[in-house]
Amino acid sequence: MSKRYETQGAFATRDLAVAYLKSLVKGVDYNIFEIVDYTDGTYSVLLG
């Protein structure tokens, strides 16, 4: 089952945003299916 996580606030780089989102789901085995980079610096990551 997939779940979408979004960052709250802007991140300087995509790598920082992804590292933050991965930290939210520690201990879970998952794959990143999609990363959406919004123009305001926020990111959305679909994990499953």
Image: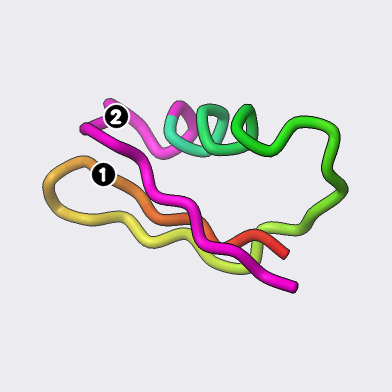
- Of residues 14 and 28, the one drawn nearer to the viewer in this rendering: 28
Q: Which residue is mark 2?
A: 11
Q: Are marks 2 and 1 in contact (CB under 8 Å)?
A: yes
Give residue 1's quadrant in the image.
bottom right
Q: What residue occupies the far left of the structure in this picture?
A: 40
Expressed as whole percent of the image width and height from the top left, the position of residue 26 reads 75, 31
Q: Which residue is mark 1?
A: 42
State the quadrant of the C terminus: bottom right
- The vertical placement of 1 against 7, above or below, is below
Residue type indicated by callout 2:
Phe
Q: Residues within 10 Å of mark 1 (few under 14, many from 20)?
A: some
Q: Residue at the location (39% across, 49% down)?
A: 6
Q: Residues within 10 Å of mark 2 (few under 14, many from 20)?
A: some
Which tag, 2 or 1, sits closer to the chain's start?
2
Expressed as whole percent of the image width and height from the top left, the position of residue 10 reads 22, 32
* Left or right: residue 1 compared with residue 34: right
Q: Residue at the location (21% across, 41% down)?
A: 41
- The vertical placement of 36 against 41, above or below, is below
What is the magenta range? Answer: 1-16
Residue type indicated by callout 1:
Thr
- Of residues 37 and 27, the one drawn nearer to the viewer in this rendering: 27
Expressed as whole percent of the image width and height from the top left, the position of residue 18 reads 52, 38
* Left or right: residue 18 compared with residue 27: left
